[in-house]
Image: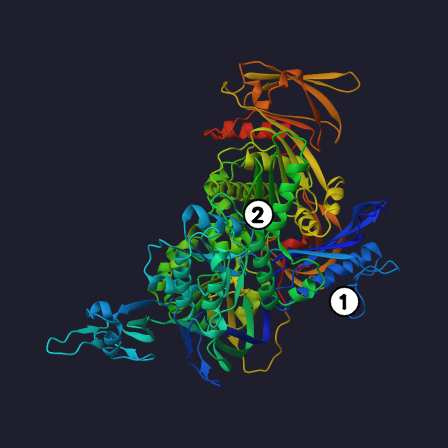
């Protein structure tokens, strides 16, 4: 069983490597400061080729004549309408490029063109400094600050001041709570069950939403929403864990980076980063559950509550539903202790 | 000890993306026994990025359990076993890591080389990106775009029976070489040729200055014959070398094995054939389901032909696809009580974030069961569709219990299998307690005695012998009378009603003779021709089961009636839903 670590730290060195697949270009230099929504590299997601048979196009009888008529060479960048080949004589004909492209090869009388495609940007995801360029592969960026990792996001990034609409750790964010004073800010809300919240947020130019939880029935609306949305706890009504709540509340009005772009296959998580002008150490990954670990319950009636492990049982416990599994005794901030399966705990450190 | 036992102590290693599991076997009283297993989380991902960390954790645990030293101070496995009892004689390694190595295949004719290429790839874990055909409808630049964009690790060319077509193969090779010339030098794929051997030299000449080529025997030497093993061996060797480069720590484990490491799917295939041969049934047909976090591998042997499919377990590997491809509403119809759709949706979306969570209450438990049944059912349907298998008659079905370890009650596992596979006829349901089959398959290559002796032991248990009764009678009609005669002369008679499931408890291994009497014109031949003379039956962990729910199981639309049926079925199986 794997215990997920969702870093919820007041101060940490945050370093991320942004790698692009396929052919691309790095757009930044070492030492450059970048914003969350800045493109730091761009890449071509899909190459397209076309082959132009000059001999056939110009009706040459032999390949040598066709080859001699070719006006371009390997490596040339050509624009739509540029002449690729032209026959000689009084009734001269020409072959023009149908698209912007690069000449990648000429074999016999065939010109192989790689079409110029609009590149796709790779966003920095958070305010940071470029610390390393990985030639033809990507960029390493770094900053120091508070780090709060979420469980789900809608694959967008932004930065802006964070404001809270929450007083308690469990509240519902309704369209009525989307206030005009939130314009241009990233809003900390609670549980969201109504997709009108997203529309209201878009209409008011809110820059992003930090939610504790969301109803699965509006997940597709969240994916289609133009502003970044992060979930810190999960789907279904759930309070925000105390640790994240306090951390965000204590940084209210500060500029935060909200990066909901992540890829589970690459072990990435959506995250909130609040840049701080203090040097820090990198968070420790690969932590295992042990006595004293700060954890969050991710399932059942205590879902979303942060706690501390008091004891990990050495033998398996039989749950009410008949499942036998290893459990830990955890203590909540109010002193209450419960036994929870290890599989249902996330590490918050 | 038998003289034929060359390796007395054997370490089986089974690693996939999530779990590293070790199996220690040794000879006790002249026979191989499974001494201990241990497992740890696979450390392929950050911050370790190396398989060795997880492997050493599992080894440490194994050493603690057995008291036997398996690694020395330099963290090297002690091979062979030493006179002080430390070490092991043989290491066998089977792995998951589905789709880590990619391949594009090229062949000539659909029903000949292309069909054989498909059969070959079904036993591997390679990510099949594209198939280039002689009559490919695509333009050459489209094939070029595909090769450049997908950048395969391997391109496999086959075609032409022995001394058959050659010009067409040369033409195919020209297309492949043209395409790969447009890849950067460091991204060139390795080429494998498994076609007409008459032109192997020409293929080598054409390829020499461009890419690395391996030539192996023709996979389709004649129109009627297929010869996959040489090509499979070559592909395994190349894939293993690529895994060494892609997966840190793979080389360390590989260095101790005598044979090339084998993907789970291949070792499962070996064991499926093996189980089929071992079966006492005349017309044996075996289905082996290896349900893991990383993948769902299914192998079936019917009439001597092996079919295999392997698919990612989307719940763990691709949650977005899992959510978009899973019919949550269909799953909800299999729930034995009413749960709000909102709650069901939230549960599934949340499970896609944290697939490892253990259900807390009873509702979560039921949702988890529904999800599990759906995973098995989907994998089985994919398998059937891939090979156009219409029959659900399997004389034996084996399922790996690794993923089912939360369900301690064998009745739960039996009902999961019956609901998801819905086998017809008479089926022996088995449970592979430790997910040992792939390991046995990989050991069998160098040590064929070990799997035979282990299968005689308790690693694989009979869950139940199941009689699935087909009848057109109305629900609730008595359709079958059975008389079960015990060895002590006592007997039990039971009427089986249409729509019911009846479990008759027997001690595991206890043998009884069952006589059948049709009560509503059901065809008793569905259980075999000599069924009227009675049938000797051995009980499993759940005894003997008579499943008269019909095939496919039709659920009532009315909630109350459906819930009552679920309640009765679970009660009959000894499962408490409260």
Disc on res. B325: none
Q: Residue at x 88, y 59 (%)?
A: B83
Whether callout 2 and callout 1 share a subunit is answered yes
Which of the pair A249/B478 is nearer the observer? B478
Q: Residue at x 27, y 79 (%)?
A: A72
Which of the pair B388/A243 is nearer the observer? B388
A242 left or right of A211 in image: right
In the displayed structure, would residue A331 be above or below residue B433? Answer: below
Which chain letter goes with mark 1? B
* The C terminus of chain B, quarter of image: top right
In the displayed structure, would residue A59 be above or below residue A327? Answer: below
In the displayed structure, would residue A291 be above or below residue B327? Answer: below
Q: Report which quarter residue A297 is drawn in.
A: bottom right
Residue B350 percent coordinates (x, y): 53, 52
Hey, which residue is sitting farthest bottom in the picture? Answer: A31
Q: Tell me, yes or no, if residue B578 can be seen here.
A: no
Q: Residue at x 21, y 74 (%)?
A: A81
Distance from disc 2 to disc 1, alpha carbons, whole Å, reads: 32 Å
Q: At numbered mark 1, what does the secondary structure look like: helix, strand or loop?
A: loop
Which residue is under mark 1? B76
Which of the pair B77/B66 is nearer the observer? B77
Q: Earlier in the sequence, mark 2 or mark 1?
A: 1
Which residue is under mark 2? B297
Residue A310 percent coordinates (x, y): 73, 59
A129 left or right of A195 in image: right
Please tell me how many numbered marks the rendered image carries.
2
Q: Residues within 10 Å of mark 1 (few under 14, many from 20)?
A: few
Which chain letter goes with mark 2? B
């Amino acid at each position: 069983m794997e215990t997920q670590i969702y870093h919820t730290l007041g101060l940490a060195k945050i370093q991320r490597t942004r790698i692009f697949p396929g052919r691309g270009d790095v757009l930044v230099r070492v030492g450059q400061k970048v914003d969350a929504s800045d493109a730091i590299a761009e890449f071509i997601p899909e190459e397209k080729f076309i082959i132009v048979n000059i001999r056939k196009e110009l009706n040459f009888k032999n390949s040598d004549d066709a080859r001699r008529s070719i006006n371009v060479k390997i490596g040339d960048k050509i624009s739509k309408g540029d002449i690729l080949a032209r026959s000689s004589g009084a009734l001269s004909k020409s072959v023009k490029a149908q698209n912007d492209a690069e000449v990648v090869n000429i074999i016999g009388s065939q010109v192989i063109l790689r079409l110029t495609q609009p590149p796709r940007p790779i966003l920095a995801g958070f305010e940071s400094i470029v610390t390393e360029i990985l030639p033809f592969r990507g960029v390493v960026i770094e900053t120091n600050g508070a780090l709060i990792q979420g469980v789900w996001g809608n694959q967008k990034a932004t930065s802006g001041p964070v404001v809270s609409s929450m007083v308690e750790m469990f509240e519902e964010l309704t369209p009525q709570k989307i206030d005009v004073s939130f314009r241009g800010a990233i809003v900390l809300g609670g549980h969201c069950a109504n997709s009108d919240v997203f529309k209201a947020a878009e209409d008011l130019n809110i820059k992003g939403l930090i939610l504790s939880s969301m109803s699965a029935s509006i997940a597709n609306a969240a994916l289609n929403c133009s502003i970044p949305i992060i979930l810190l706890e999960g789907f279904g009504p759930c309070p925000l864990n105390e640790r994240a709540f306090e951390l965000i509340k204590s940084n209210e009005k500060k500029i935060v980076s909200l990066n909901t772009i992540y890829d589970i296959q690459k072990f990435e998580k959506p995250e909130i980063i609040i840049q701080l002008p203090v040097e820090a150490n990198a968070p420790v990954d690969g932590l295992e559950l042990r006595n004293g670990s700060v954890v969050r319950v991710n399932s059942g009636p205590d879902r979303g509550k942060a706690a501390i492990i008091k004891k990990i049982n050495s033998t398996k416990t039989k749950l009410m539903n008949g499942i036998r599994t290893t459990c830990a005794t955890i203590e909540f901030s109010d002193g209450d202790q419960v036994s929870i399966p290890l599989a249902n705990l996330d590490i918050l450190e | 000890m038998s003289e034929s036992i060359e390796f007395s102590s054997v370490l089986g290693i089974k690693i996939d993306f999530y779990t590293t599991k070790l199996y220690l076997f040794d000879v006790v009283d002249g026979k191989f026994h499974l001494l201990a297993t241990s497992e740890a989380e696979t450390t392929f991902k950050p911050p370790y990025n190396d398989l060795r960390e997880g492997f050493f954790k599992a080894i440490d645990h194994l050493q603690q359990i057995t008291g036997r030293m398996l690694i020395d101070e330099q963290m090297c496995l002690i091979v062979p076993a030493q006179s002080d009892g430390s070490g092991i004689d043989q290491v066998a390694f089977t792995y998951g890591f589905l789709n880590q190595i990619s391949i594009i295949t090229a062949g000539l004719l659909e029903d000949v080389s292309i069909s054989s290429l498909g059969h070959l790839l079904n036993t591997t874990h390679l990510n099949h990106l594209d198939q280039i055909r002689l009559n490919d409808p695509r333009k050459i630049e489209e094939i070029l775009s595909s090769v450049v964009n997908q950048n395969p690790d391997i391109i496999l060319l086959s075609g032409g029976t022995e001394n058959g077509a050659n010009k067409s193969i040369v033409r195919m090779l020209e297309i492949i070489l043209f395409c790969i010339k447009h890849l950067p030098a460091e991204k060139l794929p390795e080429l494998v040729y498994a076609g007409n051997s008459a032109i192997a030299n020409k293929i080598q000449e054409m390829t020499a200055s461009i890419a690395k080529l391996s030539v192996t025997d023709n996979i389709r030497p004649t129109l009627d014959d297929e010869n996959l093993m040489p090509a499979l061996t070559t592909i395994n060797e190349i894939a293993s070398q690529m895994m060494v480069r892609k997966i840190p720590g793979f080389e360390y484990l590989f260095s101790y094995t005598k044979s090339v490491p084998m993907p789970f799917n291949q070792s499962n295939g070996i064991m499926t054939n093996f189980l089929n041969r071992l079966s006492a049934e005349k017309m044996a047909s075996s289905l082996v389901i290896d349900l893991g976090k990383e993948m769902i591998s299914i192998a079936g042997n019917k009439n001597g032909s092996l079919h295999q499919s392997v698919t990612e377990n989307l719940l763990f590997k691709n949650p977005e696809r899992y959510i978009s491809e899973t019919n949550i509403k269909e799953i909800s119809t299999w729930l034995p009580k009413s749960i709000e759709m909102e709650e069901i949706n939230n549960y599934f979306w949340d499970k896609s974030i944290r697939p490892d969570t253990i259900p807390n209450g009873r509702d979560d438990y039921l949702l988890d069961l529904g999800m599990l049944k759906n995973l098995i059912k989907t994998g089985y349907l994919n398998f059937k569709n891939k090979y156009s298998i219409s029959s659900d008659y399997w004389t034996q079905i084996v399922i790996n219990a690794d993923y089912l370890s939360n369900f301690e009650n064998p009745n739960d596992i039996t009902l999961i299998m019956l609901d998801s596979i819905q086998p017809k006829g008479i089926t022996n349901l088995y449970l592979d307690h430790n997910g040992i089959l792939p390991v046995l398959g990989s050991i069998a290559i160098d040590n064929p005695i070990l799997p035979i002796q282990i299968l005689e032991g308790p690693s694989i248990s009979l869950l139940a012998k199941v009689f699935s009764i087909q009848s057109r009678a109305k629900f609730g009609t008595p359709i079958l009378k059975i008389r079960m005669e015990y060895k002590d002369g006592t007997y039990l008679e039971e009427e089986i009603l249409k729509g019911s499931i009846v479990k008759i408890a027997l001690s595991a291994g206890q043998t009884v003779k069952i006589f059948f009497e049709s009560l509503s014109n059901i065809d008793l031949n569905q259980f075999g021709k000599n069924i009227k003379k009675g049938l000797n039956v051995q009980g499993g962990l759940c005894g003997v089961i008579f499943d008269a729910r019909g095939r496919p199981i039709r659920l009532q639309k009315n909630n109350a009636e459906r819930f009552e049926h679920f309640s009765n079925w679970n009660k009959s199986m000894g499962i408490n839903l409260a």
